[in-house]
DNA sequence: CCGGAGTTCTTTTTT
DNA sequence: AGAACTCCGG
């Protein structure tokens, strides 16, 4: 590792500035991970910092894993014990398992995922006699999640209630928290919120970690929510060696309460902070960078910065206007085939990015027809699949038979004739006698309160669980899972249930078995509980890796952090990107519009060599007739000289073969100004002042000489087209 | 308790 | 159009 040689001057500065708060604004493709990993390695190797005095937090396990690997290889060590590189949530679990008893929780708590939360909320509504139709559990779920991200307790939520519904929600929230505690469970948001509570209420614990983490590093800082912000704030108070890395232009999770102000206001929170901008891009061509920038620059809430590269301008951005969605898909497939052949590109070079998952279907159909292999990211998640959830529920019950949600899930799976009625009786009995559910079953089995047939199966069920628990005491996770599959005949049951799906599901089970085996090999804590933690905190994105020989299909959101030589951004239509959600038809707040614009920016900056935008003139939604579509307003924000319209299928690769396309191009050549012809000392992106309209940004310059027009986005008046000669613009 | 027929609902989602 | 969920009769 040679810092001077392997880093550019700005990167080097970011690595060497180790003391005091530091904000690194790392543009897309600017070598962010490189800076982070070199920084950690530098601290350990050159500054003599002990690995355990470092904390690096990321949002995904994948990012954490990659970072860990790269630091290891930089330092040329086989392992880094006690170095905390982890996600927020894993770090919280680690802290909570050790100290949560201070807050009256049992340290063997389980982690509830979104589905568990929903199930529990339904229970709460039932208990409170609230109709699910008047107050959708999903709505409550998201409200509670948002509240927790803001660190609002049920009481605080109630105080802040503005609508009638909030009163009810506060009620449900309160009961929900009680039930979580009864079940000895924490949901995802609790992991953070409770850790912050722990820091605030138990000073010894806070001091311990403040002292431990002498250097703190946070990745993707633009995506932190308030709870995470406080979490970091507490930990960094002592040493103030806090380095945050992020890009405000890539903040696309506001709907999950990510607060872009965390990054925009960093310098206010830490007045002594140093700011470093990484603006050299190592991924894309200049044309791609310019186009992406010309879109995102229209956002008012952003830090000024502009990416550059020494790669050269590269291809223009292609724009294809399709007749309808199947034409769009057909075009994309054809373009992929052509580039595959003519540039001998592997299929893994291509990504098709869309705003919503529902868009994937037409592309899948066309790809199948064209015989092009693809992988689809997102949609059905591994740990969300029924069979996986069933088996994990078994494991959860084995680990902790007092987990009522898990217990209820498996009680009748495989079917053993214990239905709603029987369950209700047991639950009532449990409530009356103050038993946990499993206990209640055992006790009830001794009485004659149940019909004899139910009694028999319940006996068997209890026996089954007790046997498995005993077995688990002396066996590994994978062995327990194997055994569990045998004694329940789960696979056989699947085949009976749904012979068509069974094969697929059994494959998934094999995958789960593989996951347990891998876990046993790599984890330091090999307990069942640790495996369950890992399962709860692992997502699909973590396992995604570019599949050799396959085109990738995914949403713009999932594409963040990835790169592809050729990117198709499809459905570039007003309403789809920017997306108009159902409730706010045709109206987006400025903040929402800016987030959509950032999403567009993220998509564009995934492309290394070629960026192709497509849209359809007419599109069917669900089963409706075709809707007339307008091009996305973001396309308009791209200077026309960076765009090349393709109206006929086929992409020019090395001199086009299609004479019609050639003809078309010739006609347009003269209309396409080159970069240098934007004269008049004004450039796209310049901030200007106009006598009447005030301040704004030049978005585009069209035409030549007397006819030259300037398109300016004024902060207070919006988009205006002005004649360059008469506009009397001044630089700001 | 099960399975078929109706009903509703479609944003994005690192954990 | 389809999944996913609810509801009701056998």
Image (cartoon, coloured by chain):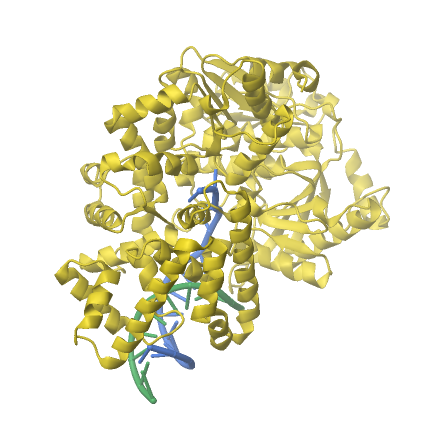
Chain colours: A yellow, B blue, C green
Tally of marks:
0
Query: Relative to the observer, which residue lies in front, A127 or A234?
Result: A234
Query: Relative to the observer, which residue lies in front, C2 or A490?
Result: A490
Q: Extreme left residue here?
A: A432
Asked where in the image residue A589 lies, by quadrant, the reply is top left
Left or right position of A400 against A445: right
Examine the rendered structure and indicate whether residue A384 appears above or below residue A685.
Answer: below
Asked where in the image residue A562 lies, by quadrant, the reply is top right
User: Residue at left 74%, top 21%?
Assistant: A676
User: Residue at left 71%, top 47%?
Assistant: A348
Q: Quadrant of the N terminus of chain A?
A: top right
Residue A239 percent location from the top left of the image: 40, 15
Left or right position of A431 against A539: left
Left or right position of A684 against A430: right
Asked where in the image residue A130 lies, by quadrant, the reply is bottom left
Residue A644 percent location from the top left of the image: 72, 39
Query: Relative to the observer, which residue lies in front, A707 or A332?
Result: A332
Residue A19 percent location from the top left of the image: 48, 12
Q: Quadrant of the C terminus of chain A?
A: top right
Residue A492 percent location from the top left of the image: 50, 74
User: Residue at left 53%, top 57%?
Assistant: A513
Residue A148 visible in the displayed image? yes
User: Residue at left 38%, top 74%?
Assistant: A415
């Amino acid at each position: 590792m040679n810092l001077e040689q392997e880093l550019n001057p700005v990167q080097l500065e970011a690595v060497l500035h180790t003391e005091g708060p530091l904000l690194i604004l790392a543009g897309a493709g600017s070598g962010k991970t490189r800076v982070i990993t070199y920084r950690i390695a530098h601290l350990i190797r050159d500054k003599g910092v002990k690995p355990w005095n470092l904390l690096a937090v990321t949002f995904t396990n994948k990012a954490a894993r990659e970072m860990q690997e790269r630091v290891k290889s930089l330092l040329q060590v086989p392992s880094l014990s006690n170095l905390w590189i982890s996600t927020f949530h894993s770090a919280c679990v680690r802290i909570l398992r050790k100290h949560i008893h201070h807050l009256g929780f049992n340290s063997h708590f389980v982690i509830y995922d979104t589905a568990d939360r929903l199930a529990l909320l339904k229970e709460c509504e039932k208990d409170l006699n609230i109709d699910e139709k008047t107050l959708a559990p999903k709505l409550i779920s998201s409200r509670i999640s948002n509240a927790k991200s803001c660190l609002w307790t049920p009481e605080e939520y109630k105080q802040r209630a503005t609508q009638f519904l909030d009163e009810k929600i506060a009620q449900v929230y309160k009961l929900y928290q009680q039930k979580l505690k009864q079940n000895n469970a924490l949901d995802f948001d609790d992991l953070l919120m409770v850790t912050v509570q722990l820091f605030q209420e138990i000073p010894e614990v806070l001091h311990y970690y403040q002292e431990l983490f002498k250097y703190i590093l946070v990745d993707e800082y633009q995506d932190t929510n308030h709870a995470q912000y406080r979490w970091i704030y507490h930990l960094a108070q002592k040493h103030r060696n806090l380095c945050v890395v992020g890009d405000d232009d890539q903040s696309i999770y506001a709907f999950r309460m990510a607060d872009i102000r965390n990054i925009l206001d960093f310098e206010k929170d830490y007045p002594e902070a140093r700011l470093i901008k990484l603006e050299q891009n190592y991924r894309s061509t200049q044309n791609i960078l310019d186009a992406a920038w010309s879109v995102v620059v229209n956002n008012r809430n952003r830090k000024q910065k502009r990416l550059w590269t020494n790669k050269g301008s590269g291809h223009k951005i292609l724009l294809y206007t399709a007749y309808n969605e199947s034409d769009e898909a057909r075009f994309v497939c054809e373009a992929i085939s052509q580039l595959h052949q003519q540039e001998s590109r592997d299929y893994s070079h291509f990504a098709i990015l869309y705003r919503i998952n529902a868009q994937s279907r037409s592309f899948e159909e066309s790809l199948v027809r064209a015989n092009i292999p693809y992988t689809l990211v997102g949609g059905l998640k591994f740990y969300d699949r029924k069979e996986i959830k069933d088996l994990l529920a078994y494991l959860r019950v084995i680990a902790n038979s007092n987990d009522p949600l898990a217990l209820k899930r498996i009680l009748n799976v495989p079917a053993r004739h214990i239905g709603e009625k029987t369950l209700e009786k047991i639950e009532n009995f449990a409530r009356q006698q103050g038993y946990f559910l499993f206990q209640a079953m055992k006790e009830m089995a001794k009485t004659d309160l149940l019909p004899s047939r139910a009694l028999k199966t319940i006996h068997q069920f209890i026996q089954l669980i007790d046997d498995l628990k005993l077995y688990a005491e002396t066996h590994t996770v994978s062995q327990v899972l194997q055994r569990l599959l045998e004694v329940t005949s789960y696979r056989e049951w699947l085949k009976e249930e749904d012979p068509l799906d069974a094969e697929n599901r059994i494959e998934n089970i094999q995958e789960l078995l593989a996951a347990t085996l891998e876990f046993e090999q790599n984890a330091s804590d090999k307990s069942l509980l640790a495996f369950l933690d890992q399962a709860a905190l692992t997502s699909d994105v973590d396992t995604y890796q570019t599949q050799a020989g396959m085109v990738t299909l995914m949403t713009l959101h999932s594409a963040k952090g990835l790169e592809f030589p050729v990117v198709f951004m499809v459905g570039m239509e007003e309403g789809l990107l920017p997306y108009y959600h159902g409730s706010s038809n045709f109206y987006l707040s400025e903040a929402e519009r800016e987030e959509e614009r950032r999403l567009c920016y993220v998509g564009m900056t995934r492309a290394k060599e070629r960026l192709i935008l497509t849209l359809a003139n007419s599109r069917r939604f669900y089963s409706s007739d075709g809707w007339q579509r307008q091009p996305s307003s973001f396309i308009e924000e791209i200077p026309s000289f960076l765009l090349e319209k393709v109206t006929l299928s086929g992409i020019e690769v090395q001199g086009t073969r299609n004479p019609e396309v050639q003809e078309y191009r010739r006609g347009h050549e003269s209309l396409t100004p080159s970069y240098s012809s934007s004269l008049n000392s004004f450039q796209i992106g310049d901030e200007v002042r106009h006598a009447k309209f005030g301040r704004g940004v030049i978005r585009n310059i069209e035409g030549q000489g007397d006819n030259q027009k300037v398109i300016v986005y004024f902060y207070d008046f919006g988009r205006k087209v002005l004649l360059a000669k008469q506009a009397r613009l001044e630089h700001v």
